[in-house]
Image (cartoon, grey):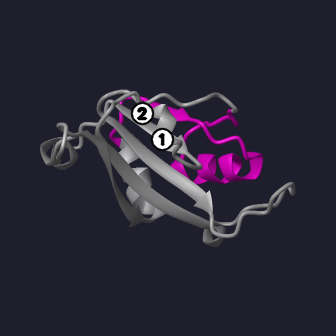
């Protein structure tokens, strides 16, 4: 995604993830550019997107994000596959609780905005 797209606020697809599996990106050479951000920046991107897809399974996190982003989201165990021009909003627990269902609050989450850039061999 180019800086022009970000400046113009044109977002074909915003993808909500709790992590980014590298095998979801079907490219041979690529770079992932990420920026730590906040929920307000993610809400702004979501507001100007044509489509939002959720790949977060954790029910409490999805419920909180639905409220904060003012959109209806459902937990999803689907596998994500990258498409050109995706904007990735990665929302993850600051302190993951393995095997436990916890009630998530705003301050429990870290937020990242990422884009994938295809690279030429050797770049």
Q: Mark 2 and mark 1: span between their CA atoms?
A: 6 Å
Residue at the image point whose x is 50% and y is 35% from the top: 23
Asked whether 55 or 51 is in front, the reply is 55
Residue 10 inside the magenta-drawn segment: no
User: Residue at point 29% right, 33% down?
Assistant: 85
Q: Judge from the rendering whether residue 23 lies leftward or rightward of residue 4; answer left or right.
A: right
> What is the x, y in percent for residue 114?
37, 50
Relative height, residue 116 to residue 39 (above, below): above
Q: Are marks 2 and 1 in contact (CB under 8 Å)?
A: yes
The magenta stretch spans residue 74:
yes
**Position in image of residue 53 (x %, y %):** 51, 32
- In the rendered view, tell whether residue 55 sits above or below residue 91: above
Q: Which residue is mark 2?
A: 25
Residue at x 69%, y 69% (from the top left corner): 95
Q: Residue at 50% across / 51% down in the picture?
A: 90
Q: Which mark is residue 22?
A: 1
Asked which secondary structure carries label 2, the reply is: loop
Disc 1 secondary structure class: helix
Q: Residues within 10 Å of mark 1 (few under 14, many from 20)?
A: few
The dot on residue 66 is none
Snapshot quadrant of residue 88: top left
> On the image, which quarter does residue 12 sit in?
top left
């Amino acid at each position: 995604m180019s800086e022009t797209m970000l400046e113009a606020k044109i977002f074909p697809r915003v993808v909500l993830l709790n992590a980014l599996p590298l095998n979801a990106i079907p490219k041979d050479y690529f770079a992932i550019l990420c920026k730590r951000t906040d929920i307000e920046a993610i809400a702004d991107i979501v507001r100007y997107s044509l489509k939002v897809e959720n790949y977060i399974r954790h029910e409490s996190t999805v419920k909180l994000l639905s409220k904060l982003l003012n959109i209806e989201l459902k937990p999803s165990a689907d596998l994500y596959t990258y498409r050109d021009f995706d904007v990735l909003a990665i929302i993850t627990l600051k302190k993951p609780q393995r095997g436990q269902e916890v009630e998530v609050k705003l301050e429990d989450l870290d937020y990242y905005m990422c884009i994938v850039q295809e690279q030429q061999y050797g770049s």
